[in-house]
Image (cartoon, helix red, strand yellow):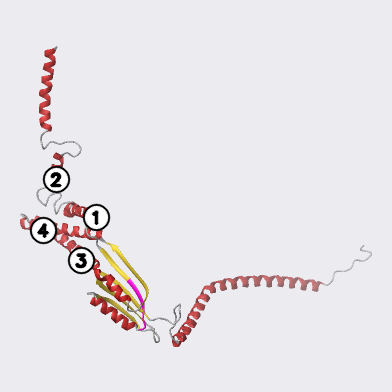
Amino acid sequence: MRRRSLALLAASALLLAPLSACAALPGSSAPGGAPGSATLDATPLPGDLGGSGDLGGSGDLGGSGERLAGEAMNADAGAERSLTRSAELALTADDVRGTADRAVKIAEGAGGRVDSRTEDAGTGAGSGSSSLSLRVPAERLDATLTELAALGTVERQSVSAVDVTAEHVDLTARVEALESSIARLTQLMADASTTSELLEAESALSSRQQELDGLRAQLTWLEGQVDEATIWVSVSAPTVLPGGGPSSFWDGVLAGLQSIGAAASGGLVLLGILLPWFVIGAVIAGAVLLIVRAARRRRADAARRQSEEGPAPEATPETR
């Protein structure tokens, strides 16, 4: 029995030795994503014309482009924040046009420019308004607002910022992926051995180049919004009335004439609203009037017939 047990132990050891050697090999697979399987998955496919190449079903943007975008979005937390800033400033000043001119000089002195300017001369002395859209470097926004606020009386002021870091990182990653794809397609065109491969590469290259130009334009616009801040400035003349209104006698006269016109217009609108009701009321009143006249006519006819027949004869003793 002892010899038989020793023989069984020796046979088991001989069987387990090859299995242990196979498990120790570096290329063997193991459950749960072992190194061997990860190495096979990470091995790139040869050539760009394959299933995952530039011209395949998934393409560079579907594979490497999305991977680059995902990595860029994962790095978003540690990236520098991209903010688009804007401000709105409402001023009142006696010299509206002069104040607007000084606001333009302040923006240009800060390294900015004027995107738009609208002037309203008004209808009387001391009235009028001006609206400006100014673009200044984002780092000079606060200092420029301080200088602009000193030009007159501040009626309203607001500053806002929008975080566009995610959009900036995504556009940058997509542009980089397209640039890499175009570089590989250019190499494929140089190494193409057949006319069909050359034509297919040219078609894909044209499509990718068009998409790259569009993404570059979007990225340039977004970076411009981040680098420069927008300030909307409105300048108006102060009013004599505390609640706002005409600033002179003639302005009051004009306001009175305008109020007459507004009242007349309001009366016409009210008449238009009530006209259908007047029509319905007239129809109902006409129907009631016809019914009343018909009843009166019937009563008159009955009375006339009774008067023509005469009074009823009195009863005599014989008839009694």
Q: Which residue is mark 1?
A: 77
- Cα separation, mark 2 vs mark 3, equals 35 Å
Amino acid at the residue labelled 3:
Thr
Given the image, on which type of amino acid does mark 1 rest? Ala
Q: Give the image quarter of residue 311.
A: bottom right
Quarter holding the N terminus is: top left
Which is nearer the N-term, disc 2 or disc 3? 2
Mark 4 element type:
helix
Question: Quick one: label 3, few (<14), some, or many (20+) residues within 10 Å?
Answer: some
Q: Quadrant of the C terminus?
A: bottom right
* Residue under the point 52% across and 78% down: 267
Q: Based on the displayed image, in which of its 4 quarters is residue 164 positioned?
A: bottom left
The mark lying in front, picked from 2 and 1, is 1
What secondary structure is marked by label 2? helix
Q: Residues within 10 Å of mark 4 (few under 14, many from 20)?
A: few
Which residue is the site of mark 4?
A: 183
**Disc 4 vs disc 2: Cβ atoms closer than 8 Å?**
no
* Dominant secondary structure, magenta: strand
Q: Is residue 143 inside the magenta stretch?
A: no
Q: Which residue is at a point 11% across and 32% down the rendered structure image?
A: 22
**Where is residue 108 drawn, in percent x and y?**
24, 77
Question: Distance of mark 3 from mark 4, alpha carbons?
Answer: 21 Å
* Nearest to N terminus: mark 3 or mark 4: 4
Q: Position of residue 116 (x, y in %)?
A: 28, 76
Numbered tag placed on residue 220 in the rendering: 3
Q: Amino acid at mark 2?
A: Ala
Spatial distance from mark 4 to mark 2, Cα to Cα? Answer: 22 Å
Q: Position of residue 242 (x, y in %)?
A: 45, 78
